Image: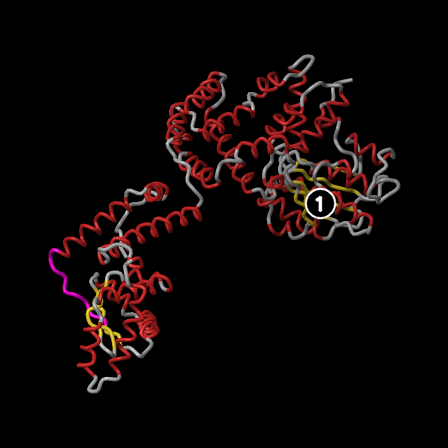
Amino acid sequence: MSYIVFARKYRPQTFEEVIKQEHVSKTLANAISSNRVSHAILLSGPRGTGKTTVARILAKAMNCKNGPTPVPCNSCRSCTDIISGSSADVLEIDGASNNGVEQIRTLRENVKYMPAYSLYKIYIIDEVHMLSVPAFNALLKTLEEPPEHIMFILATTEPHKIPITILSRCQRYDFRRIDVESLSKHMEMICDKEGVDISFESLSIIARVASGSMRDALSLLDQVISCAQGSVTHEKVLDILSVIDRKKIYDISSAILSGDVAVFLGILDEIYNRGYEMKRLYSDIVEHFRNLIVVKMGKDVKKLVDLPSHEIELAQEQIKDVTSVYLNQILNLLFKEEPAIRFAAQPKLTLEMIFIKMFQIKPAMPIDLLIEKLDTIKNEVYEKQGNEIFEHQLPYGDYNKRPGVQDNEKDLKASLSKSKETEGSNESVAAACLDDVKDHERTWKKLLDVFLKNHPSLAANLTRCTLKKMTDHGLEIEVNGNGFNLKMISRSKNMTIIKKVCEDFFGKKMDIVITQKKKQKAENKSNNNREDSLKKEALSHRLVADVVEIFNGNVVDVKIL
């Protein structure tokens, strides 16, 4: 007897044996149990995922001597004939080679005949999308209203090529790619039955090459076992399939994340000498970093990453100290440089240049942390600016420590109270008050202490001001800064705050007048020098340099507020 390949030998014979297509098999089983099976069914999906297998199981379930039943017996005449492919009532038609209108006309003539010994005459048309337009047109009426004893099961890998008029007449079931772990476990079960010694890691390599196709996976497994006489080692599997060891991919990503150029170039040279295609390696690396980003996200990892469990654990360990922003930087560069490697005359050299460029990328911090750091810079510059101005206006050191300053407010209020009792107040009384106040500057500094404590943002602008005049009815505050300071202080909201603080301080109603001092050239020069110094300090800060590099931008202007 000739050898039977694994794809045929271990073909599922019941709905329960179908791998990873429960959404199709359970629905069809329930439809059979409730007697709600459609007369026209379309099975679509990638190659090797079980479309033809499910079509045959459905045919057995409908024509079994115990049927229709969701679990065919696989022993009656109808079931055994379908399994062997010799059933007179279940006809499998290849749509690629029987795609003409004449073949469909013949089919349409034959549907009028009753089945030979089964309940239904079933037509399984594989690769139905290959039918010509006239053939589809000839099938339309029969597909919509076939005789009661006729059933159509259509299978295709490209449902978008089927006319909508055909799709609307069918009940459609979409098959899914089979994940690597499910393929590996199924092959492991077959190897146990066959007595083949092969590691699960090697089976995972075969499953990855199969790209979600069970038929491809079993065919590759057949090939590996045939080529590797005796025990199947992992190295033999890699050589036979001409694939790269997954460990090498992780070694490459580890070298990239650690910034070790020498290690990376050594691994790349080793892979190149083994004859592995550089363009394919680049594609593997891109896919790997995509998987690392998904693993870093930490949500639905097994659903979003088609990797075996041990590789997911390895990925989690590799990126535990790496930010998602840095991983995204790397993946973004890989995507940008993909055309270069695709059209490269020397792929290895191009790949080396791309990754050397990648090693120059500095790990970026998360955007929320970056904003926090920028706020810190702003506050540092802002605080320094305020301190310099404050110290300029307070040449004698800490105002609160000066002798007699604690009694300043008390003395001032007593002086003002005394002036009220004097006849002929108005300006003459105000002059007397001013004579009692030894130093306007001390009064203003005391007010600034109140602002700094309760309104620090406003105090930053008031530190540029001086108390120009003080009367019994109000204060005249002179702004020494630029127009921006005058604008900020003159806002109605800020004026309300200033008025309230002054009235609370003096214990009476006060009128506040804001004026701007005419700048002298020397003062302007001094202020400009100070602002230039602050600007240079901000521009030379490490975080500002990082922001410019990360966003590939440039500094347009620096505002000193």
- Rendered image quadrant of residue 401: bottom left
Specify few, some or many for label 1: CA neighbours under 10 Å numbering under 14, 14-19, or 20 or more: few
The answer to whether residue 136 is above or below residue 469 is: above
The one of 96 and 351 positioned closer to us in this rendering = 351
Element under label 1? helix
Residue beneath the point at 51% across and 37% down = 290
- Closer to the camera, 462 or 108? 462
Quadrant where the N terminus is found in the figure = top right
Q: Nearer the viewer, residue 328 or 347?
A: 328
Give the image location of residue 54, x and y in percent.
73, 39
Q: Is residue 42 above or below residue 397?
A: above
Residue extending furthest bottom? 423
Q: Position of residue 121 (x, y in %)?
A: 79, 42
Query: Is residue 96 found inside the magenta-colored segment of the image?
Result: no
Q: On screen, 16 above or below 236?
A: below
Tell how many labels. Answer: 1
Q: Give the colour scheme of this rendering.
A: secondary structure
**538 or 292: which is nearer to us?**
538
Quarter of the image for residue 356 reads top left
- Residue furthest to the left: 521
The percent coordinates of residue 19 (x first, y second) are 71, 36
Tell me where the magenta segment starts and ends, as one range.
514-522
- Position of residue 537 in the picture relative to residue 353 (left or right): left
> Which quadrant holds the C terminus?
bottom left
Residue matched to label 1:
23
Image location of residue 475, percent across then percent down: 24, 73
The amino acid on which the numbered mark 1 sits, given as a three-letter code, is His
Question: Which residue: 45% across, 41% down?
Answer: 325
Of all residues, the one furthest to the front in this rendering is 403
